[in-house]
Image (cartoon, rainbow, N blue to C red):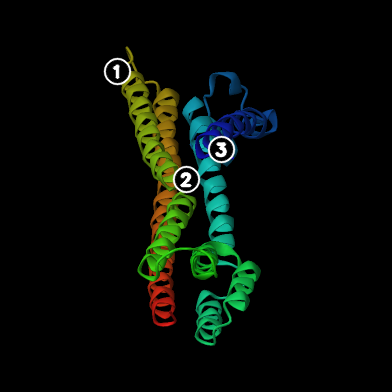
Amino acid sequence: MKQSAFIVTLFFVAMISAYLIYELVLGNPANFADYATKGTKHVPLGGNIMALTYVGGPLVALLIGLSIMVIAVIIERTLSLKKAAGKQPIPKFFKTVIDQIRSGNINEAVASCDKQRGSVANVLKSALTRYQEVTAAGSGIEKEKQLVEVERAVEETLMLETPLLEKNLIALSTISSIATMVGLLGTVIGMIRSFKALAAGGAPDAIGLATGISEALINTAGGLIAAIIGIVSYNFFVNKVDNFTFQIDEAKYNVMQLLKTSK
């Protein structure tokens, strides 16, 4: 699935799920059993935690949806990067391939790449298969151009593998930033309601004041939780991608040097 299609689909699924959670779980009448004014959301600060969360207003549903999106992207990236690593630890796989190339067993090295799979294996396989093609009898390619062709094949594979490693990371960062802004918006709206209750004619509306403060704090907490999880995960995955890129570059360099000396 393309990145844009995945994010759009995830957005609608997350928002629908969030609305259902907000109305059916948080807004369950059982959470307001002690209060007769559930419809007006006049819930004291000491109430049921789900009822208090419901008081946060519609923005809570949006924050739940953003949190679902963050968790979904984290799961997707974890599975994708695990798949990109291959079946064996990369250092062990790389050592096996290097030993096979040094022994002149290119076919065995290609078979090892097929068995390993993953980004590093795909890059090495493209180099080895192209090397076999350009060095085969009757290829008609001059020796000085053979490694150039191998290098080109490797670069083409890298252009395909790198976007797969970085997929959805920008979306994760964006969702985290939006969650922060939504939480801040909820905080401002809650404080506006609090000051409105405080400025009411005669005695201040204590219930309205408490509800507004509760709404502000709930949205602040929700936005911060989603943002913290998203930002920490984004930095973690960026570091993982950088590590993959380094390993790919190292593998490419070493294999190219071996192929160059084996000519």
Position of the N terminus, as image quadrant, is: top right
Mark 3: secondary structure: helix
Dot 2 and dot 3 residues touching (CB under 8 Å): yes
* Vertical placement of residue 98 versus 204, above or below: below
- The residue to which callout 3 is attached is 6
Measure how far apart labels 1 and 2 are at the Cα level. Answer: 46 Å
Q: Position of residue 210 (x, y in %)?
A: 42, 30
Q: Earlier in the sequence, mark 2 or mark 3?
A: 3
Q: Quarter of the image holding residue 226? A: top left
The type of residue carrying mark 2 is Asn
- At 57% across and 46% down in the image, what residue appears? 72
The type of residue carrying mark 3 is Phe
Mark 1: secondary structure: loop
Q: Position of residue 233 (x, y in %)?
A: 44, 55
- At 33% across and 19% down in the image, what residue appears? 196
Q: How many marks?
A: 3
Discs 1/3, front: 3
Discs 1/2, front: 2
Q: Position of residue 216 (x, y in %)?
A: 39, 33
Q: Earlier in the sequence, mark 1 or mark 2?
A: 2
- The residue to which callout 2 is attached is 168
Task: Give whichever of 91, 136 is nearer the camera.
Answer: 136
Q: Position of residue 49 (x, y in %)?
A: 56, 41
